[in-house]
Amino acid sequence: MATPAFEEIAETFDFLDDWEDRYRHVIELGKAFPPMDDAFRVPATKVQGCASQVWLQPVIDGGRFDFQGDSDAMIVKGLIAVLHALYAGLPVADVAKVDAAAELARLGLNEHLSSQRSNGLRAMVERIRKVAAEAA
């Protein structure tokens, strides 16, 4: 149930031969991701469980899920961009139907992220699912 934006990332990952190229691609996604308004960098939007500082600000518009996000680590900002591609634009009721672990496994992230980064990624997914469930 991946979005077209996520499918595009998955196709790019399939094309890239080694993890270093994929890692660089994630960083490039982070650099291209729009900056988050500083007004949203508050304790209420901060994601606990991440080694880096991470903020996610949900945006529900017309029953569709979206979010702004940012991090002080470029690789993590890239992971935020990947999650944005996975979830943005979905009806809030469909967010819970996304098997994030399976979709992210398609990218090989499980094998190549540190345990701290993996824990942070799971914390971001949990926050996204929680916010969408509350909005649904």
Image (cartoon, grey):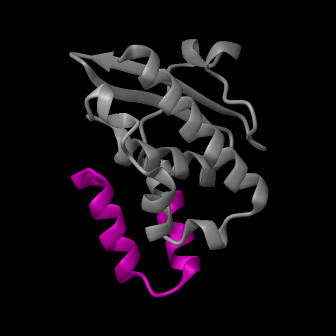
Q: How many marks?
A: 0
Report the magenta residues as a range: 1-27
Q: Residue at x 26, y 50 (%)?
A: 3
**Is residue 55 shown left or right of residue 90?**
right
Q: Residue at x 46, y 87 (%)?
A: 17
Is 100 situated above or below 92? below
Q: Residue at x 30, y 35 (%)?
A: 94
The question of residue 16 being in magenta is answered with yes
In the picture as drawn, the residue positioned furthest to the front comes out as: 97
Q: Position of residue 72 (x, y in %)?
A: 68, 39
> Relative to the observer, which residue lies in front, 19 or 107?
107
Q: Decide if residue 7 is on the left or right side of residue 106.
A: left
Q: Main secondary structure of the magenta part?
A: helix
- Residue that appears at 62% across and 46% down: 122
Q: Is residue 130 above or below residue 96?
A: above
Q: Position of residue 105 (x, y in %)?
A: 50, 66
- Residue 2 highlighted magenta (yes or no): yes
Q: Position of residue 95 (x, y in %)?
A: 37, 35
Q: Quadrant of residue 48?
A: top right
Residue 66 vs 1, above or below: the answer is: above
x and y percent of residue 93 in the render? 31, 28
Query: Which quarter of the image is occupied by the C terminus?
Result: top left
Of residues 136 and 7, the one drawn nearer to the viewer in this rendering? 136
Decide if residue 67 is on the left or right side of residue 124.
left
